[in-house]
Image: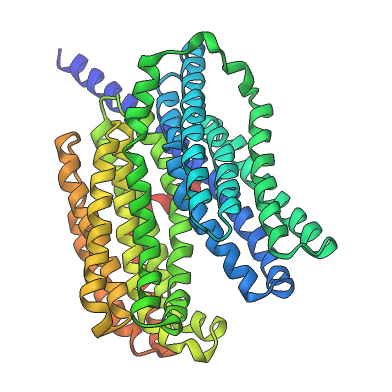
Amino acid sequence: MKNNYNFFTTNLCLEEGLKMKEKNKRLAKNTIIILISKFCTQFLSLIILPFLTTLLTTDEYGTFDLISTFAWLIAPFMSIQIENGIFRFLIDVRDNQKEIKNIITNGIIDAIIQLLIFTCIYAVILLNFHINNGIAIYLYALSTILLNIPLQISRGLGDNLSYAKSSIIVGISNLVLSIITIYNFRLGLNGLIISGIISNIIGGLYIIFKKRLYKYFSYKLLNKLQSKELIKYSLPLVPNSISSWITSISDKAMISILIGTSANGIYSIATKFSILLSHFFSVFNLSWTESAVLSQKEEDRDQYYSETIDNLFFICSSVCLLVLVAMPIIFKIMINEKFNEAYMYIPFLIIGSMFELFSGLIGAIYISLKKSKNIAISTFIAGVINIIINLLFMRKFGIIVACISTIISYAILSMYRIIDIRKYVNLRLDYKKYIFLAILIAILICLYQRNSILISAISIIITVIYSIIINKKHLKAIGRK
């Protein structure tokens, strides 16, 4: 009897181990696919940058940046984030063609109705108030939605490869069209806007025809209950998106208003590295969100969530530390001396990006549980705290307040989510590792302020050793592959 019990438990452990291995394999595969697409699109944007800065005036480029920023702001109101609802609901029904058609049909109808309502309201605003480049902002936001809905459907159906290819097609199309419209036709700012809009539409059409999405649409499947469920999930994501916009953009706006545009230039340089890290982390978050949803109903869910959050965080935090300790060398090579003040702010912004990463990893669990309201509430709290700190202290203490407010707002966001998520999931994180990491960060920041190549070399050695030890399991797995 004892032997039978041992045999049973051994088989059970092996089965659980195989399941965990398969889930990790799926997560790694999706991460690599999305990472390649992100790298390609970022690389293409870097290729076109010297071309744009040569042919466009600073005013034209600044205006385009403003148009894209405000397009990002109004897009959630135009679609009520229904694309994210479609993605989340599709994951649960990947093997059911009828339900897939039902969700896509009702999601697209919801998007069209909301788009018509917003268009009427926006037209009234434009007729009564003067908004610089108002039509360009609307068209750019519309093209973004026409791209995002097919992209999220592709992800919802589990086709991350088509998602990645579409992103690369958008990048290539934008590069080619920008050269044609700006260099050949000398359209300047208008050429850049037209290129962005058309490339987004091309990317969306690629998914539509590649996945034959038109076959999933049928008026016969209109369902008020399904439509309400999609809207109920998606609507709270609108204030969440706006709060994210406020958190990321408000610092620059308030520095410009309270201190000056020169200070904003310094701050913008300081944020370049943390923004690049955030783009890098978004790759992990996209693939992790899908894995979290797929594992939501499995018995080992809590263990998988706990282990994956730990693993992803320590992999990404190791990257953060390596960037931090290499900064004394990188900064002197890449940044002009007139921006030297930015050097002292970079560590704080990198720490802020680490808290942003952690809160995002927890946020994926909310999505898996369809708790979109919790995402919105927590992000709103963080955004309000960020603005209050800046208003109270920025004029007196300067740029450093923006850095500290970023850390505090994302830290509170992380703590709120880790406490709140325990209502639904029993997370068992390795807090000893987090405490050790906090101590190491404090030491490395003290060494960083010395701004010495020798000390930087010592810091790099310490960080490399730490990264190898903390991620040895993953490095062994890569070695075996």
Q: Quadrant of residue 210?
A: top right
Q: Residue at x 55, y 59 (%)?
A: 67
Q: Between 13 and 88, which is closer to the camera in this rendering? A: 88
Q: Is residue 204 visible?
A: yes
Q: Between 54 and 421, which is closer to the camera in this rendering? A: 54
Q: Is residue 456 left or right of residue 30?
A: left
Q: Is residue 475 left or right of residue 143?
A: left
Q: Residue furthest top?
A: 220
Q: Is residue 337 above or below residue 442?
A: below
Q: Quadrant of residue 56?
A: bottom right
The quadrant of the image that shows the N terminus is: top left
Can you give x and y, in whole percent of width and height, for residue 192 in the image?
69, 59
Q: Residue at x 54, y 12 (%)?
A: 219
Can you give x and y, in whole percent of width and height, for residue 430 in the image?
21, 51
Q: Between 302 and 128, which is closer to the camera in this rendering? A: 128
Q: Is residue 183 above or below residue 88?
A: below
Can you give x and y, in whole percent of width and height, for residue 473 in the image?
37, 50
Q: Is residue 117 left or right of residue 397?
A: right
Q: Residue at x 27, y 22 (%)?
A: 12
Q: Between 354 and 64, which is closer to the camera in this rendering? A: 64
Can you give x and y, in whole percent of width and height, for residue 345 in the image?
36, 79
Q: Residue furthest right?
A: 184
* Count of residue discs: 0
Q: Residue at x 26, y 51 (%)?
A: 380
Question: What colour scheme does the image use?
Answer: rainbow
Q: Is residue 469 visible?
A: no
